[in-house]
Image: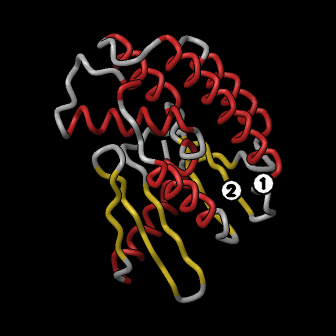
Amino acid sequence: MPFTFYSPFERLTKFRLCRWMHQNNGMKITASMSDVVVPEKVLESQRKLMQELRQVPSSYTILDSNIFQSMVREIKYFAGLNMLTDDDIDVMKQELHRLLDEMELIAARGEYSNGNKAYLYLSNINFEATYTFLEKGSFQLCMFRLYAINYMDSQHPEICRAQKEWIQSLKRYSTLISQSGEIQRMIFFTKQREIVDTL
């Protein structure tokens, strides 16, 4: 799931950071997410980055149809390790529902609350990574998600060109659900809510 979607939600952000810490820094299985304190500086940086990214006049996001299933599966796994409290799970469930409400509103309107265009696509194939390409005037930036929360970025013209072409190729296998594809949009969001309700 792109961090730009979940970053406004504090418990989901904390969960992703704890998941990364557990996997990469050897966070003890006996530790609980409630024991982890995420510095306000980190949360504020994520909020600012999300706000900046939403200033891009037009954004294109291709969603994997398993996007919420993967997140719910991870939450259940870490709950099974006793790293999450019942409160953690309840709050994340509420945050996921609020995230779905926000995403559905963006898809229906075709824009963020600030009026900038948002094109959401639903992929008809599974893909294994989060790909980002930003372009404004002569500025180009591409980002590749690595290791759960990290990104590698490049402004090299050839890498940006290849990233842009790859994203364009993914659009061929996807359905636009922003201001169109109403039936597919309704089915997708209904299914995602059912998945979240299994928590």
Residue shown at the point (55%, 51%) measured from the top left: 4
Residues 48 and 71: in front is 48
Position in image of residue 58 (x %, y %): 68, 67
The answer to whether residue 179 is left or right of residue 158 is right
Callout 2: SS = strand
On residue 183, which mark appears? none
The answer to whether residue 162 is left or right of residue 81 is right
**Do residues under tags 1 and 2 come within 8 Å of each other at their CB atoms?**
yes
Q: Quickly name the residue at label 1.
A: 110
On residue 119, which mark appears? 2
**Picture quadrant of residue 70:** top left
Disc 2 marks a residue whose amino acid type is: Tyr
Q: Closer to the N terminus: mark 1 or mark 2?
A: 1
Callout 1: SS = loop
Position in image of residue 189 (x %, y %): 69, 29
What is the total number of numbered labels drawn onto the structure image?
A: 2
Position in image of residue 66 (x %, y %): 49, 31
